[in-house]
Amino acid sequence: MASKFGLAGGIPERRVRPIWDAIDSRQFKNALKLVTALLSKFPNSPYCLALKALILERMGKSEEALSLCLNAKEHLHKNDSVLMDDLTLSTLQIVFQRLDHLEMATSCYEYACGKFPSNLELMMGLFNCYVREYSFVKQQQTAIRMYKLVGEERFLLWAVCSIQLQVFCGNGGEKLLLLAEGLVKKHVASHSLHEPEALMVYISILEQQAKYGDALEILSGKLGSLLLVEVDKLRIQGRLLARVGDYAAAAIIFQKILELCPDDWECFLHYLGCLLEDDSNWCNRAITDPIHPPKFVECKISNLTDEVFDSRMSNASEFVQKLQGNTGNNFARCPYLANIEIERRKCLHGKGDDGKLMEALIQYFFGFGHLACFTSDVEMFLEVLTPDKKAELLGKLRESSASISAVPAKVLGQSITLFKIQELIGNMSKLTVVELEGSVVQMVEMYCKNLPLSKDLDSQESMHGEELLSLACNVLIQLYWRTRNVGYFVEAIMLLEFGLTIRRHVWQYKILLLHLYSHLGALSLAYEWFKSLDVKNILMETVSHHILPQMLVSPLWVDINNLLKDYLKFMDDHLRESADLTFLAYRHRNYSKVIEFVQFKERLQHSNQYLVARVEGPILQLKQNAVNIEEEEAVLESLKCGIHFVELSNEIGSKSLTFNEDLQSRPWWAPTSERNYLLGPYEGVSYYPRENSMTEREANVRSIIERKSLLPRMIYLSIQSASTSLKENLEVNGSVSDPKIPSELKILLERYAKMLGYSFTDAIEMVLGVSGGQKSFEVFGSDLIDWINFSVFLNAWNLSSHEIGLANGRCADSILEKYVSDKVSSMETLITSPWVDLPILVQLVTESLAWHGLVIQSCVRSCFPSGKKKKKTGFADQSCLSRIRDSVLSLCNTLEKVRKWLKEQINRPEDENMETLLSSLRKKEQIEGPGQVFQIIETFTSSIHDTELGERISQSLKSWSHVDVARKIVAGKCTVLSEFLRICDSKSKLFQALKQQIAQA
Amino acid sequence: MTTIRRFCCNDLLRFTSVNLDHLTETFNMSFYMTYLARWPDYFHVAEAPGNRIMGYIMGKVEGQGESWHGHVTAVTVAPEYRRQQLAKKLMNLLEDFSDKIDKGYFVDLFVRASNTPAIKMYEKLGYIIYRRVLRYYSGEEDGLDMRKALSRDVEKKSIIPLKRPVTPDELEYD
């Protein structure tokens, strides 16, 4: 690294090189020794100081590093003779950035540039500072100064990009684009342009101002030759022509592209759009979410006369025929799919014929029906058919499949396609239970029968027929939903585990299993499979939703902590380094990427999941430390007593959120993390189009964040409130405690009540009603935990305010105790039944009860200040003490009930659990009901033919054991319960200690 | 049915189903973004009807003198779209760009020595094993450096296989 620098701040390179080498090899101690020696020779060298600061920062000594940096900065400023080179400044900048003091680095560069106004290198450094700060206006000004200094094209474009950034990501008006256009125009007149990217920027500026004609003129002029790839140029030309409304010319251009790239589907849609003079392709770009583009082709009903429409469509058909003739090979699907699209457009225009559309689909099936992508290719076309027609089509496809191919892999592919089409058109819900069972049996038999096809495949390659097991799982879960027979559910698990025994890399199985295990309550197993997906980097943003929500309400604290930590680290790292990458794009003159990078950073910054994780992280910390009030207070202090979170709660309504999760990979029964159809009654549907549920999700996330981010502050205030109330009682002269605490807590309680949909007084009435037994818990609905939290904080507030004078102030105790008793006595035996109520119970103990426990700890601490067992005397004290005693007893009681129940579950003999689980499958002599698929697997594995299946598959089949899976499920559920028990134990210990402390009083 | 276009940042949020495949590495953000910032013409994505991502290729151009060449860093296709010669299309695109626009001498790539299906595919596309790199992958598995000569290398000098294997520190580029 040092070799790049030559003389640095007047220090010979040979002295600096060993220091950089030591830093690069992370030998910081050694580096520190070297730099200290160097500093003794050059005590006032800002470069040496910066270098030492850099090393100290890497060693974690932030404060020392900062003071050295400031020292260096001072030397730079006060001593005119000091060399002010970019190396010194950029070293300082690295440290300042890592210390979160970007502004100081910027001020150093600003100073240096003021002193040496014609030093280009320093100015680039300053530009870089503004890039890091996202100060687009200052970027623009600096770039213009550089441009004026040396007249280089790149600096002009830096300025232009900075202007575009002001328009797209800042608050600059669109008028600024005119300025950018003027700058480029002037430069072109005197110097022309030399980089293809510069031309692209120029065109984009014109396009953004809807000056399509001007853009076309430039493209077809001399500058157009900068674009070296012909097709790229044609694409832009076609787009501009279409946007200017010259559809005829645009169609010709798209035709040209298709002749060069006959498989370009998007281009075909543009072509067709232009023929029909339909601008939907061009108008809707801005409103379409780039992450979740529509599956369906948007188009308008054409206004063309019938005659013109007919003639254009027949032109299109002719052209498509020609393309089909030219392509020859079997892999270009576009010219064939194009036929279907033409028929679909005719239907939409009212001039079509379902028969012809179906015929086109069947033709496509002949050519490509064996491909895994057939169904997704044709999905959008099936939409225009009525349910009856869809069923008719399925029948026709079945008939034709018999005659197509004799190649086994192709036959298999087609059969899978038929199952997928059946699933897609919603046909499954019309089948009876027996028919569905028949279908699933067929799928699994087909899978087993075709395993020999994969005999010679490498273990890394996906096997023939893998999709069958996912399809079968979908049907089994449908059967479970209909019949509520858990046997189907267990069978689906067995089937997928069986598939993963044969080939352990099928991520589709892993995701399905993850959801099945989550639903069943074996969350530790779900997490195991999640980990095996190796979700890292950007996948954390798109895939975590499969596991994160369940984990957040589970007792698996260590795992959830890791999940949150890794995810937040990824996001924070990216947000930190993104600006440097943007500068890299500037340097390499890839200007379009500059805008893209900044927009992408904003997209991630506004991620709903990121925001949730930033709230849930601290809440988890609070949950984990709730058994020790001192530690909890330290956590709260690090969170600034929750003030920022209250601000977040205030602002969330107006914040824009992005949704980057990939929901396509979710199972049909849980299309978003908020929905799980299996929790509700059977609705007679088997296929849910993944409708855009963004609005619903957005409202949901906002309300979660709004409520959750109030928690840290409410906890803090409750603790304070409890302690001041007692102090008030204890001090004879009633020395005034901070009156703001109860009033702030009251405001937050009012807000909390409002979020739950009630006025403060009504909400109080509600919790009193439930605690007094006049109302049932059902009135709380799905907000149960929030309501109980409300009662806990209400109780804390009541301690110090007495405004409403709750009887004994013990409604929180009784609500907790009542709810737990109800639940524990009514919960099903857990091993074979899905996990529905447990997460609520976990939340109740780890959240509501924990917060209540803190209030009590605070009270007790106030009664026995500085750990003295000897209490102060006083009348009020006695009544308080007895109230606290009652609360502690009640909590002990509540926890004891949970613990007893958990122990009963955990201590059930394993054999008994296994038997219960497996008995749901083994029903000999029975032709209906769950177990049929299971039998197929068992029979198949008991009669393996090594030669037929090849060694690899045979070996893996031999390792299959359903007993192992059953044991794993039992153990997995017990792990979760044991973790929960561990938490209950630690809480129980705390309350026992408090009980003793009070008893000794 | 492939619309091949430049890869953009938003595609990072859409390539999940491709990258969940265990053979496809998910790199860190600065890796992808450095490629996008420096070699956007070497980073392409293929889309299917319904705007589904089929696969993508990322690469770069590097070297000096006669070793100026295109490099394939990653090429991957989602299982749903395999066996349709998509990888070939993507490779051809990169080769074409290296050949005609950047005027490189050859294109090279590294592959795990155990990844027989991939090696076979590259051989079909005209790549030969130029040399073996010992313990290239995480210091464990050997890598094969495969090359294909471009039109500028008239005598095909760049693809004469080396007789002995090399170690990772002997490599000219990372």
Image: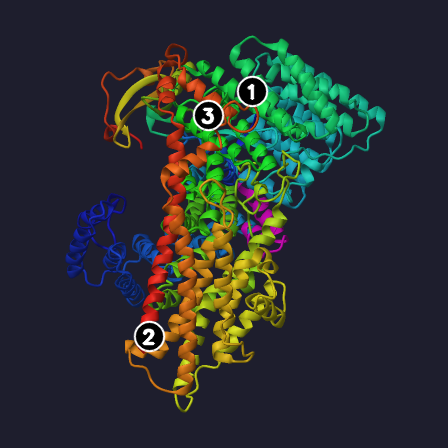
Give the extent of the magenta segment: A165-193
- Residue A248, image x, y percentages: 74, 28
**Magenta span includes A358:** no
Q: Is residue B41 above or below residue A70?
A: above
- Residue A598 in view (yes/no): yes
Q: Mark 3 points at which residue?
A: B94
Chain ID at mark 1: A
Specify the amino acid type for callout 1: Gln
Please name the predominant secondary structure of the magenta segment in the image. helix
Closer to us: A982 or A919: A919
Q: Mark 1 points at which residue?
A: A442
Horizontally, residue A644 falls left or right of residue A637, namely right
- Residue drawn 49% across the image and 69% down it: A793
Label 2 – label 3 distance at C-alpha: 80 Å
Name the image colouring: rainbow
Mark 1, residues whose alpha carbon is within 10 Å: few (<14), some, or many (≥20)?
some
Q: Name the residue under label 2.
A: A999
Chain ID at mark 2: A
Q: Which of marks 2 and 3 is in front?
A: 2
Checking the image for residue A259, the label placed there is none
Chain ID at mark 3: B
